[in-house]
Amino acid sequence: MTVNKRTVLGMAIVVVGLLLSNKTSHASYNYYPPKPQPLPPVPKTPTKIKVSIFDAIKNASDKYGVPLNISLGVAKVESNFSPTAVSRKGAGGLFQLMPGTASGYGVTDVFDPIQNANAGNKFLAAMYVKYGNWNDALAAYNWGPGNFDKYRLGLKEIPSSVAVYIGKVLDASDQYV
């Protein structure tokens, strides 16, 4: 495994979070999310993606206000832009939606790039609104908001794989800025 700046940063965030969560008790935990970060500039159109897949992702990111480079980074890491990708845990499509998440967002065909991109971006936008920054939104997207909420309350430790995931998505998103 190669270690890059984003992986180290992601792991540092996890360590700081763990240290802070150990200093506060569950009963006295008061968390006010940071103010949302400014959106990154409009990214260049990638040339290595099929136009229909790119259009599905771009239209969905525009519709739900997710920066296009973040949306493309998630799709790249989750499925390598394959609308037919399936994970060992049963997630499917471009944004690797779990069956419960997909049905919760009205997806009837997880392998339909338009439905999957819309649901994935709507979920990402909801995580950003809830947590106020892209690192936390990506952590909740990857690990699940229930798990991430327990981590923020100091009830659960965050796996290092989540920090690695955040680093991979941010590295991939840099390709599209």
Image (cartoon, helix red, strand yellow):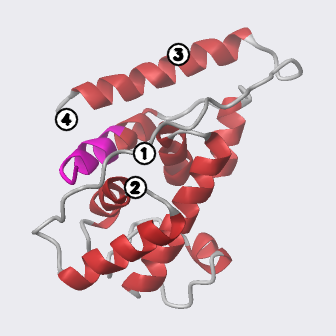
Q: Residue 89 location in percent, x, y?
A: 47, 65
Q: Which residues are magenta?
A: 167-177
Label 1 vs label 3: CA separation? Answer: 25 Å
Task: Please check the rendered image and state whether residue 174 is part of the magenta-colored stretch, yes or no.
Answer: yes
- Number of residues whose C-alpha sits closer than 10 Å to that of mark 1, classed few (under 14), some (14–19) or many (20 or more): few
Say what secondary structure mark 4 lies in.
loop
Q: Residue 142 location in percent, x, y?
A: 49, 51
Quarter of the figure that contains the N terminus: top left
Q: Hey, which residue is sitting farthest top in the picture?
A: 23
Q: Residue 79 location in percent, x, y?
A: 30, 67
- Residue 137 shows which numbered tag? none
Residue drawn at x 25%, y 55% is 43
119 horizontally vs 175: left or right: right
Q: Nearer the viewer, residue 77 or 2?
A: 77
128 horizontally vs 50: left or right: right
Residue drawn at x 45%, y 40% is 162
Residue that mark 1 sits on: 39
Residue that mark 4 sits on: 1
Q: Residue 48 location in percent, x, y?
A: 11, 69
Indicate which disc, 2 or 3, sits on the residue closer to the N terminus: 3
Residue drawn at x 56%, y 67% is 122
